[in-house]
Image: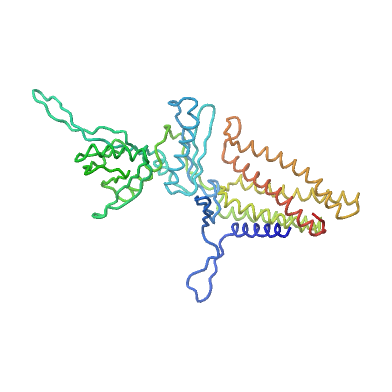
Amino acid sequence: MKNRLYFYIFLILFCLWIALPPLVINLPFVNKPITIKPEKIEINVLGKKLGINNEYKLGLDLQGGSHLVFLVDTSGFKNQDIESAVEASRNIIEKRINFFGVAEPQVYLLKQNNNYRVSVDIPGNKNPQQAINQIGKTAQLDFREYKTKEVQQGTESAQMAYFEPTKLNGQFLKKAALVFDQQSGNPQVSLVFNKEGARLFGEITKKNIQKPLAIFLDEQLLTAPTVQQAITDGKAVISGDFTVEEAKVLINSLNAGALPAPIKLIEQKTVEATLGQANIRQSLLAGVFGLLCVIMFMLILYKKEGLVAFISLMVYTIISLALYKILGIVLTISGIAGFLLSIGMAVDANILIYERIKEEQLLLKDKQIAVRSGFFRALAAIKSANFNTLLVCLILFNPLNLSFLPEFGMVRGFALTLALGVLLGLFTGVFITKNILWRIYKIEK
């Protein structure tokens, strides 16, 4: 029992540490301010880095940004291949936006009848054209062999040189990176092929020794170095008249890959923040004031049990705010509304428990038995109500992208924060409230 209590205390303190903003302390005789909490926490889980940013992610309606919608052309795919092609296109678009360096883009699919759309929200970005260029840019890389053929010119024949495509192209690329020429210092693009690409590159270079091997990008000749020897390690370097920025753009395009299905921009707009910083601050103050009123009501009406509800509600709020950072949930106006509604439901659960305890005490007289009986009788009603709410949240979130259900980010944000709040409310109501009541009234487990 003590171990469980220690676990709850540790969990609450950890979530409090995550939820609170960094504390900056200015000490005398110290030139640099001391930050108690790092800006970003990185946790390595099974070789994968999970980052916890110290800032809450705000949606377009809270901080403004760019909103883009692309129509995916699926006419060239069989019915069984459409879903995978559209999903792959969505993933590549998201990867390209991430390479672009914008803050926390939201990319999701919309399906209406047989039309597939990819909606892209980029909070904080006020130049949609840059994002459009990055998303729409397709870097088609391929290697071509030097060939000659005889052509007839009047009564004489002549040799004409040309480059013939090989099977080696960007499809076999594993990674592209920025390097610099050791002699000139000019930026270059280093290529590393996968296993099959390395085999093809080895075969091509082996049969083209002392011949030019051309590298084309989007049908434009970049460079045509002469092969000195067979290259079997699967590595190559593109050298050209690049600036560092141009090389980085090329690298990002190569790493992101080509879109499996063509896309067409059908909507673009710059979204201004619906709420300014002053309005956000006022809304938060209003929420805190409302929360304090609820707490005062609980303390006046239920006395000792009201204090338990206050503790449970504080734990609920701390864990909720921490999870928003850990899970990277994007906060929108509708999402905040869902969070506030879930707080009301968490309070409602405590009221149901205490009112049921009152009824049981009138019948049973013994306080300990009344608390135990009232708690478990109320719990059945709480679970039933929360289950129905979760079912509604599932319908609103529409995880399968069904066309006859809502597909809008605003509705999904509301559903997500409300569902998370309902689950947390069950946790704080069942575990936190129960454990405190059991300790107050010395009820045996």
Q: Which image quarter: residue 367? A: bottom right
Picture coordinates of residue 152 (x, y %)? 13, 24
User: Relative to residue 318, is residue 383 depicted above or below?
Assistant: above
Between 276 and 293, the one nearer to me in the picture: 293
For the rendered model, the colour scheme is: rainbow
Between 200 and 115, the one nearer to me in the picture: 200
User: Relative to residue 34, is residue 221 depicted above or below?
Assistant: above
Residue furthest bottom as drawn: 29
Quadrant of the snapshot with the C terminus: bottom right
Tell me what residue is drawn at x 23 percent, y 36 percent. 207
Q: Is residue 22 left or right of residue 224?
A: right
Picture coordinates of residue 115 (x, y %)? 50, 28
Q: Is residue 361 left or right of residue 37?
A: right
Picture coordinates of residue 239 (x, y %)? 27, 46
Picture coordinates of residue 86 (x, y %)? 48, 33
Q: Which image quarter: residue 200? A: top left
Residue furthest top as drawn: 155
Residue furthest left as drawn: 155
Q: Which image quarter: residue 205? A: top left
